[in-house]
């Protein structure tokens, strides 16, 4: 269960125990597993289940246009608490018994009004990524996030060098990093990850 006022500092694209351990040791409050088969960071639910986390750390599953029943099945296998939905899902597709973060790409034509009424617990704003869902490493105008009452998680091209500015412009509930803190897709650079986590926690006053 997510504490309502807890700040989210998330490391996404976790594929192995070493990276999960380093993320948690560095202060991550959430770790993400990508279950989109076309992602270079895809992980099978059974493998994700074998990666231990820690009490209080949110286990998030990334899904793209997946059937509700399958999301619920994977959540059970991998002990997920949150579903991060990146596709064209509507509220009827949201899994039961889980927190939902709805992802949106901020690009030409983006409008908060398309998302304001969604019952998702948070809106995750990501950069443009073509057919990649999560981990494309592209930033966007972070200041747009300051113009909504929705609970916002910033993603897309964040690392230790820019997360403080992103937080200052957007005032988000949380931040999410992936590709910019990797040595290869699905393999974290622990120095870059530590730098991001330190800068993010300081910016968010964790």
Image (cartoon, rainbow, N blue to C red):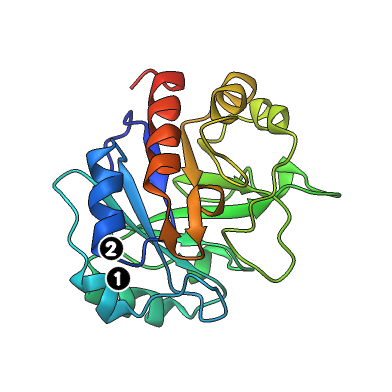
User: In the rendering, at what x and y percent does residue 31 appear?
Assistant: 34, 52
Direction from residue 81 to residue 7 in the image, left or right: right
Crowding near pointer 2: few (<14 within 10 Å), some, many (20+)?
Answer: many
Residue at horizontal 58 percent and vertical 54 percent from the top = 103
For residue 5, above or below residue 132? above
Q: Quadrant of residue 146?
A: top right
Report which residue position mark 1 lands on. Answer: 75
Most distant residue in the left direction: 55
**Mark 2–mark 1 distance (CA, rounded to whole Å):** 5 Å
Q: Quadrant of residue 100?
A: bottom left
Direction from residue 147 to residue 63 in the image, left or right: left
Q: Which mark is residue 80?
A: 2
Which secondary structure lies at badge 2?
Answer: loop
Precedes in sequence: disc 2 or disc 1: 1
Which secondary structure lies at badge 1?
Answer: helix
Q: Locate the C terminus by quadrant.
A: top left
User: In the rendering, at what x and y percent does residue 33 appear?
Assistant: 38, 64
Q: Quadrant of residue 51?
A: bottom left
User: In the rendering, at what x and y percent does residue 48 appear?
Assistant: 28, 71
Crowding near pointer 1: few (<14 within 10 Å), some, many (20+)?
Answer: many
Find out whether the residues at labels 2 and 1 contact each other: C-beta distance under 8 Å. yes
């Amino acid at each position: 269960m997510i504490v309502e006022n807890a700040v989210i500092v998330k490391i996404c694209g976790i594929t192995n125990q070493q990276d999960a351990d380093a993320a948690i040791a560095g202060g991550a409050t959430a770790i993400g597993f990508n279950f989109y088969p076309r992602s270079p960071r895809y992980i099978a639910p059974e493998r994700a289940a074998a990666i231990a986390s820690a009490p209080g750390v949110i286990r998030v599953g990334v899904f793209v246009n997946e059937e509700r029943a399958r999301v619920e099945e994977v959540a059970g296998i991998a002990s997920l608490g949150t579903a991060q939905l990146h596709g064209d899902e509507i509220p009827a597709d949201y899994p039961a018994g889980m927190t939902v973060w709805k992802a949106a790409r901020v690009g030409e034509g983006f409008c908060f009004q398309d998302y304001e009424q969604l019952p998702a617990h948070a809106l995750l704003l990501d950069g443009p990524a073509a057919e990649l869902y999560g981990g494309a490493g592209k930033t966007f105008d972070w200041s747009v996030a300051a113009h909504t009452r929705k609970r916002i998680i910033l993603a897309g091209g964040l690392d230790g060098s820019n997360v403080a500015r992103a937080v200052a412009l957007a005032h988000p509930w949380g931040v999410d990093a992936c590709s910019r803190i990797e040595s290869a897709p699905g393999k974290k650079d622990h120095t870059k990850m530590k730098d991001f986590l330190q800068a993010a926690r300081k910016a968010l006053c964790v």
